[in-house]
Amino acid sequence: MKSKLKIAIFSLTSCSGCQMEVVNLGGKFLDILKYIKVENFPLVKEKKNVKKYDVVFIEGSPVTKKNIKELKKIRKKTKFLIALGTCACLGCVQKMKNYRNKDEVIKNVYQFVKKIDNFEIKPLKDYVTIDFELSGCPINKNEFYWAICQLLAGKIPKISQRPVCYECQLEENECLLQKGQVCLGPLILGGCEAVCLKSKQSCDGCRGFLKDAKIENYIKIFKKQGIDKKDFEESLEIFGLK
Ligand code: SF4
Ligand code: SF4
Ligand code: SF4
């Protein structure tokens, strides 16, 4: 019998929401345990001194020296490294700090803590080689499942470069952009099943830009709709797209 794929799921600094989505797969996750061996998943059970993995998923951003050291150590131990969620792929909400005066923020938030690390928030790919990115805040658990199935079939997962609008319009949602609201859907990588639009919330771009996002064209559209450029720029700050 073919040996099971040895995987691990780790987290750096994050809210753990993407790992929770993996757990939320419930019975589906238990089903794939026939084919994979979860060697390490500290959220559920930590195992020390594992030497090698086939696939590692890492959630979160490196915000301390310890996080960076951990990330580099994990990279050496795995054949295939996947950035899990927008913190890992882009920096996500933690990256908002980069758009502010960081010294001022630290002074106000940690006024009684001396010598705190104050790193620029960067995606994992700025520190180590990443083999695949699964973005989303949080990730789409069905997409995680699909990615594991692709790997089990010996394929490298590849996400179709379709905008959020594609799934939004398949659902026949009312277009918020046409109503004069900022919605980043035309610029953003789909795959989330346009979940925000189902609840009549605009897309703030948590999955990151499409490879060929036509930002200039988008700006022309929203100018026509009378949308303020400032509102657009503020939307870009939420998930670290600015
Ligand atoms: S991407 Fe979002 S849900 Fe996932 S860990 Fe980061 S903040 Fe949490
Ligand atoms: S509401 Fe947003 S995601 Fe949906 S079609 Fe309009 S611009 Fe695209
Ligand atoms: S609609 Fe936009 S903000 Fe909402 S989950 Fe999808 S990509 Fe993220």
Image: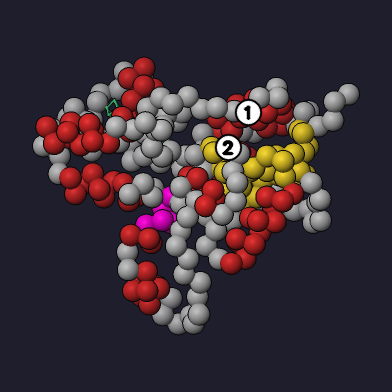
Q: Which residues are magenta?
A: 92-96
User: Residue 132 vs residue 91: left or right?
Assistant: right
The tally of labels here is 2
Residue found 68% across the figure and 50% down from its top: 75
Q: Secondary structure at mark 1?
A: loop
Residue in front for this viewpoint, 88 or 140: 88
Picture disc at residue 156: 1
**Residue appearing at x 47%, y 55% in the figure:** 122
C-alpha separation, residue under disc 2 versus residue under disc 1: 8 Å
Q: Is residue 168 above or below residue 226?
A: above
At label 2, the amino acid type is Phe
Return the x and y of residue 145 as percentages of the image width and height: 61, 29
Relative to 70, say whether 136 is above or below. above
**Residue sitting at x 37%, y 27%:** 163
User: Which quarter of the rendered picture does the N terminus lie within?
Assistant: top right
Q: Main secondary structure of the magenta part?
A: helix
Res. 151 visible in picture: yes
Q: Are marks 2 and 1 in contact (CB under 8 Å)?
A: yes
Q: Can you give x and y, in whole percent of width and height, for residue 197 in the image?
A: 33, 30
Q: Which residue is mark 2?
A: 132
For marks 2 and 1 on the same chain, the one whose residue lies earlier in the sequence = 2
Q: Amino acid at mark 1?
A: Ile
Looking at the picture, how far across and down is residue 100, in whole percent? 32, 64
